[in-house]
Amino acid sequence: MPDPVRTFRHFREVPLHLWRWPNFSPAEIACRGTGQLKLHPAALDKLQALRDRLGKPLIVRSAYRSPEHNRAVGGAPRSKHMIGAAFDIAMSNHDPAAFEAAAREVGFLGFGAYPRSGFMHIDLGPARSWGDPFPPRPVPFAAETPPARETLAASRTLRGTGAAGVATVGAAGVDVAQEVLTEAQGAILPLVPYLDTLRWLFIALALGGIAVAVWARLDDWKRGLR
C-alpha cells in the first residue's frame, strides 16, 4: 500500500523519520510563498530515482504550491503542484533531451518545456506534454572534474613537501632532546652520541623530501596538474 500524502503547515514540522530522500530537503520541496508542504511520497520517490539515474544535482525551481501561491504565480487551476506531484527543474546543468528521457524511465508522465525560463516541468501524469522544445546545445556538457582541492591532494608535490616538513620538525626535536639529555644524569649520557646520527638521518630525509617535491612539481606541471 502506498504511503499516504500528508500536509504540513510548515516544512519545519516534517518529522525526520518521514523524510527518506537524501538528495533533497523539505525546504526545497515546500511552497515558496507560504512554507507549507504537501508530502507526496510516490512523487518524491520518482524524483530521487531521477537524481540517482542522472548522477548530478537537480535544482528544484518549484515543487509544492499552496492554492493561494499557485494563483499568485499564475499556475494552472488544477496544477499538479498543488498536490505535491509536480516539479520544475532547472536545465542549467542538464541536457534537456537526456533529462526528459531519464524522467520518463523512472515514471514521470507529464512534461512541460520552458526554454526561455530555463526549466522543465515534470509530474506524475496523465501523460501529456507542452511547450517549445529546447534548442540543441552547441556542445555537450564537459565531464565533471574533481574540485581543485582534490587534484592538489593527489599531487605528489604535497606528499614530498609533507615528508620534508615532518623530517625537519624531527631534526629540530632531536636537537632539543640532545640538549636536555646533555644536562641530565650521567647514566643517560651514553645515549647522546646516537642522537647525532638520528638528527642527520632526519636532515637527509628532509633533503630527500624537498628533492621529491621539486621533481614532482615539475612533473605535475608537465601533466597539467598545476
Image (spheres, rainbow, N blue to C red):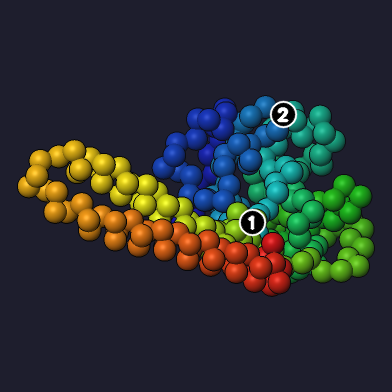
Q: Quadrant of residue 177?
A: top left
Quarter residue 68 falls in: top right
Q: How many marks?
A: 2
Quadrant in which the N terminus is drawn: bottom left
The residue wearing badge 2 is 33
Q: Relative to residue 4, is residue 54 depicted above or below?
A: below
Q: Amino acid at mark 2?
A: Gly
Dot 1 amino acid type: Pro
N-terminal of the pair, mark 1 or mark 2, is: 2
Q: Are marks 1 and 2 in contact (CB under 8 Å)?
A: no
Q: Quadrant of the C terminus?
A: bottom right
Residue depicted at x 71% and y 57%:
125
Query: Looking at this rendering, what residue extends furthest in the left direction?
Result: 187
Q: Residue at x 18, y 38 (%)?
A: 183
Point 65% across, 56% down: residue: 148
Tell me if mark 1 has few (under 14), some (14-19) or many (20+) residues whose alpha carbon lies within 10 angstroms of its own. Answer: few
Rendering coords of residue 81 (x, y %): 71, 43
Query: As drawn, is 53 to the left or to the right of 193?
Result: right
Residue 202 visible? The answer is yes
Residue 133: which quarter of the image? bottom right
* Residue 63 pos. (x, y %): 69, 43
Camera-side mark, 1 or 2 = 1
**How much space separates mark 1 and mark 2, taking CA atoms?**
35 Å
Q: Which residue is mark 1?
A: 147
Secondary structure of the residue carrying numbered label 2: loop
* Mark identifier at residue 188: none
**Front position in the image: 176 or 134:** 176
